[in-house]
Amino acid sequence: MEYYPAPGRNHLFVPGPTNVPEPILRAMNRSNEDHRSPAFPKLSKSVIDDVKEIFRTKTATSFIFPTTGTGAWESALTNTLSPGDKIISFRLGQFSLLWIDQMQRYNFDVDVVDCEWGAGIDLDVLKQKLVSDRSHSVKAVCVVHNETSTGVTNDIGAVRRVLDEANHPALLLVDGVSSIGAIDFRMDDWRVDVALTGSQKALSLPTGLGIVCASPKALEAAKRSKSTRVFFDWGDYLKFYEAGTYWPYTPSSQMLYGLRASLDMILNEEGLDNVIARHCRLAEATRQAVRAWGLTLCTKDPKWKSDTVTAVVVPSWINSNDIVKIAYKKYNLSLGVGLNKVAGKVFRIGHLGNVNELQLLGALAGVELCLMEVGYPVTLGSGVAAAQAHLAKKTPLIVSRI
Amino acid sequence: MEYYPAPGRNHLFVPGPTNVPEPILRAMNRSNEDHRSPAFPKLSKSVIDDVKEIFRTKTATSFIFPTTGTGAWESALTNTLSPGDKIISFRLGQFSLLWIDQMQRYNFDVDVVDCEWGAGIDLDVLKQKLVSDRSHSVKAVCVVHNETSTGVTNDIGAVRRVLDEANHPALLLVDGVSSIGAIDFRMDDWRVDVALTGSQKALSLPTGLGIVCASPKALEAAKRSKSTRVFFDWGDYLKFYEAGTYWPYTPSSQMLYGLRASLDMILNEEGLDNVIARHCRLAEATRQAVRAWGLTLCTKDPKWKSDTVTAVVVPSWINSNDIVKIAYKKYNLSLGVGLNKVAGKVFRIGHLGNVNELQLLGALAGVELCLMEVGYPVTLGSGVAAAQAHLAKKTPLIVSRI
Amino acid sequence: MEYYPAPGRNHLFVPGPTNVPEPILRAMNRSNEDHRSPAFPKLSKSVIDDVKEIFRTKTATSFIFPTTGTGAWESALTNTLSPGDKIISFRLGQFSLLWIDQMQRYNFDVDVVDCEWGAGIDLDVLKQKLVSDRSHSVKAVCVVHNETSTGVTNDIGAVRRVLDEANHPALLLVDGVSSIGAIDFRMDDWRVDVALTGSQKALSLPTGLGIVCASPKALEAAKRSKSTRVFFDWGDYLKFYEAGTYWPYTPSSQMLYGLRASLDMILNEEGLDNVIARHCRLAEATRQAVRAWGLTLCTKDPKWKSDTVTAVVVPSWINSNDIVKIAYKKYNLSLGVGLNKVAGKVFRIGHLGNVNELQLLGALAGVELCLMEVGYPVTLGSGVAAAQAHLAKKTPLIVSRI
Amino acid sequence: MEYYPAPGRNHLFVPGPTNVPEPILRAMNRSNEDHRSPAFPKLSKSVIDDVKEIFRTKTATSFIFPTTGTGAWESALTNTLSPGDKIISFRLGQFSLLWIDQMQRYNFDVDVVDCEWGAGIDLDVLKQKLVSDRSHSVKAVCVVHNETSTGVTNDIGAVRRVLDEANHPALLLVDGVSSIGAIDFRMDDWRVDVALTGSQKALSLPTGLGIVCASPKALEAAKRSKSTRVFFDWGDYLKFYEAGTYWPYTPSSQMLYGLRASLDMILNEEGLDNVIARHCRLAEATRQAVRAWGLTLCTKDPKWKSDTVTAVVVPSWINSNDIVKIAYKKYNLSLGVGLNKVAGKVFRIGHLGNVNELQLLGALAGVELCLMEVGYPVTLGSGVAAAQAHLAKKTPLIVSRI
């Protein structure tokens, strides 16, 4: 049963949930099975192990929770910190805002650094705070790698350098929900202590898995954490890892088979480097289109540009919601609205997950039609042409078809 | 298992098989069932009845064969004609050529009228032949409504008028494989005697159903036909229709459920008139793009333009196969090659079945990139812009989302 | 990819996850969609509303969390109680044990009443505790309706009467994970304050939804609860209910469409009363088989018999794990092992969810073969015959086929 | 949409179409693709080659037609024989009857040998006819390997010996629709000239593929055959085999991917010998059950017993249709009715395709319940026990789970 059927494929260009490719749908098209059977641990181990490659870590321990990104946040915080612990975090968009809200409601002592929406974190402020914290009262620095609401990607390697330079032992907790598996993320190189993502983003799965990787240092912290937790507790998982049965409670076998298919596609078929290059290519093409339309990015500085989502600022006399509405109602195109501070002012084009050049060009052509419809003086084809010009230079032959 | 995997959706723009939408995939995702159960006739009757609406007939009898268009041709011929019977037919492209080959191999006496590839049937020649056939030795006129290899749509209403004016009783047999359900087809109004299509075209199903509608006159002819036939025999089906069990041999329940879903989408959700209008809109947008690229249609005259496939002529110094190859290898875009007489000279863009504006614009953007890659001096975005301009004027709000 | 393939269908007779019927698989076979689209709230509202019928409540508010039963427990506790609050709970099997463990780790003050495994809760003890609690220091009574590890169903109506007779205002929190939707459950009649279930049990869905219904009194309690919570917080959901967007974070659209299909099957096609009658019929047939085999139930008294799972005690010289192993390795039959205190001593037959008479009889025939294989002197066919005798009397014609 | 929904799985025990296992459903769950793409021939070649292993032939050429068994018959006859050619064939049940009807309608000169329904072919009669045919006017002997309507398997090796002993060059054409892939079939050893099957039987696929293998001698005959044919013509296929594109008209990619999965399951996972042994085991168990019920087989002599279908004769005062009806209406069990001469007198239990011991035992238990319901004095559990006794001795551990 469809609620609002429309001919043809939906162009799903929100920054998550993303398009689920057919091989993943196929892998998931199955009845339940007994997760306590002798067969199940083989599947479990394979995904628990291999998912770490997406995080580029060999040293971390991975946990696959039946939850969403919000739950993964909760797992990251409650396993490593105790109520009252001091956290430095940056509020630079809707998702960092929500994570900070969660921190506060869990009674952590959050030193919130407010940034302009569209800007990334201010490394100088961070440095100053860390250097001045001689007693090492700060227990964690929490950063959203890619702020999905504004299209801002923070430089996590630089954050690590600031911590190092300040010689500060705080844990580094990173939300990679809309980056990991799409934007270069180097958990081991950057010594991230907890990194997390959700299944419905770069992995191109349905919503339902919150994936958390914890460094040895984070695991140590977990032993001392006084935050109450059961569902999201790493310790419970570790006991079942040791027993070789892996799950303290029932997992979704469908989602695990789907994850297996997703990892096969990313790691074995396309290759993670190629996946990242594709996101980079599609993102730059999108930015070229925006420029050609005469519009600007919400992202304040190119150094923060995001390769998974582009937030586009509309002129003040246009309500960006109207663009999103007409896209859905007329062209079966799903765009992201502006949230909170930028509501009505930006719309967002997600270019994340299992998506390719022509899907993007179709979406950009659709955006042009919507811009025209709301009265913006766009030259039809202008953004598409700019994007094409970039893609023509950068798109390689498809690996399997050379 | 994928043979040549690629990221993102394939842009399937061959003129069949066409994109299978998710509701149809869902309807077909099922194990076998007993086609002799009390439940099965309900499904059978519903699709046998409703499929006639696609042909716009209330008077014909429909047959759903587990076969392809080639089998449907065979069913049309062998049920209505006897070996040696005279047929007038027009050879104007690869599919009319193949049908004529079939007629000849079945020992019918085919009066073949060769036309230039890219032209439609010559109604004057037909008229002359019919008028001069005072003995009514011609038993059938066989016409391909839409010649998929050249993008030529013949005017079946005009054929009927020629028959009427000549007062000729020949049967009118029409191949509507790449038209029925997409281009306006009026079986009753045009008094077509046998019309046929295949599941993998406008119905957006997998290949596997050859659907044949026979007028009362055709059913009468079937009683006298001396052509040998069993699998494709209408009489066997009619016996089972009468018995209320519908199938002389095992049908594919999956395909029938899929057909049910397809008919629901076309007849109830979008509406057949809207489906036809959409095909018209997408086709015109494609032709505008071709013009903007400075290329020409294989179709010799606008009166024959096809709303389901556009055959594009490339300059003599370009091999059209190269465009199709690069489309597949670099952009995961499937285009149709030129066949037989027009091999290497044309490539084909199918815009048929469950497909929408942005999918088409993505495909057109892809064609531009391929044209550039083979050295054709295309202005990127030019075709897309021309297509957008047409679509902006013609695209209505999606029915369910108003 | 299958890890341990076997010919034919797996007979999945663990007490969850349960068989997912084809209509649900079909409903779930879809890509992601934008959960912020205008279409999504229609689906959301329909399942949030209708799921309450499974709980037989009109007064409660339902919450559908992307989690499992363990998460649903957490939601029930943390929304209604504050750290240090006194709870009475009964430890009578593995799942009540785990829930109590969770309560303790959340720093509630749990008055644990240990019961023999196989027995249900002792209503006299409960009464005594409540009556003696004149200060009403007890804030909640937490009961597992159906203890899945021992096949024990507690009488929730009787618990309510005890509370009423003691005139005690404690909240009544009920785990209905393996009962709701299969065993008669009357949230409103019994004035249950929080009731919860998981998708992979009676609803016959994949794992991934934790469904919680809260009475008005529970919602009031939630306003005062000092337990930290975000992911599982009802308040966040209520804000989005009011806004008409329903989800504070991304839900799984696939699971919601699956839930829609499940509710359609249970409420509209078969009818909840018939579903419950079927569970009752299959369970009694199973118990008759156990008796015919000369084995006993883990359930100590018929008044506690469970209609969703039968735990069978094996003679002391047999390791019940061997039965489960051979069932899997030879007959592709999945049974439940004994857990914790009854490990090796019982095996469990789940008869829960979308399952019918002949599936059960096949499974019972399989159990007989396994019993024989481990050396138990079973008469082949004896249990099947006993089960058949019961089913022959009780099985009605299938509603849709009368 | 379900027409007559019922809880739980349908027990599909008709002798085809058979249960489609999940791995095949998964493989088929896909949109269309361009069958002229560079990727497609890989798939095509792999199934065209590997399907021959099911026929146990290395010398034959295989053809996979988008049709049913009836079409495969037509292909076998029209490619090898000319109108007027003499055929010896045996009418021993509904399917041999229908094939003979087809032969006659194609104007072959059929020497029909009528046999009692329930008996196999009379080798002495065959021998006598062949020996007396000194002029070798007989061009073909056509045999149904397994007559699905009566549960009779003919000895094809013996037919070959009769031909050899008579030194007769007639072609040997064998219908293996309900045998190949389930009952031992040795095309090369027995020098069968044309053998054929359908996808919806032992291969456990949906209906839609008619698979025909032709010996070199049959291919030679095809060059001389004067029967008209196009759709079913081998020559057209051979041209496309040579070109490496494989298909003269559009195939169903879904069915080919499904066939690939089916071949993987049969040849690689379970192993063809094990598949055949399983069919043998399930069939004997079924026969033991029939004996225990005090009923008899339609099969007149054990030498003709069929390992894919058991036709059970009911007492004269019972209408076998009533058993089939109650099975469907009450127990969601699909059995085969008696056809034509044995209508009302026999019901049929198919045990064919991807099915296992417990599914069969469930079905047998269901048959017992139906027998009881129609008034037959059956001892509940008796047939199940007899079947179990056989299975207990013969069932090996599942290959992948040892």
Image: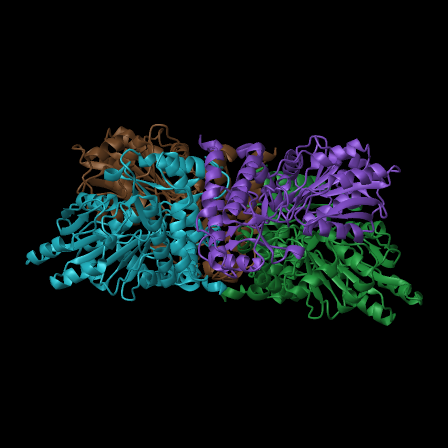
Chain colours: A cyan, B purple, C brown, D green
Q: Position of residue D77 (x, y in %)?
A: 79, 57
Percent x, y of residue B105: 79, 53
Which residue: 78% across, 35% down? Answer: B163
How many numbered marks have been drawn onto this rendered protein structure?
Answer: 0
Q: Nearer the viewer, residue C234 or C216?
A: C234
Percent position (x, y) of residue C385? Answer: 58, 47
Q: Nearer the viewer, residue D73 or C18?
A: D73
Task: Residue C3: give x, y in percent of width and height.
Answer: 47, 62
Residue B222 in sight from this viewpoint: no
Residue B110 shown left or right of residue A372 in the figure: right
Q: Residue C221 is drawn in which quadrant?
A: top left
Q: Is residue C353 left or right of residue D342?
A: left
Q: Nearer the viewer, residue B189 or D346?
A: B189
In this view of the protein, can residue D327 be seen by the observer?
yes
Residue at 20 percent of width and 43 percent of height: A101
Residue A93 location, quadrant: top left
Residue in the foreground of this view, choosing between A371 and B292? B292
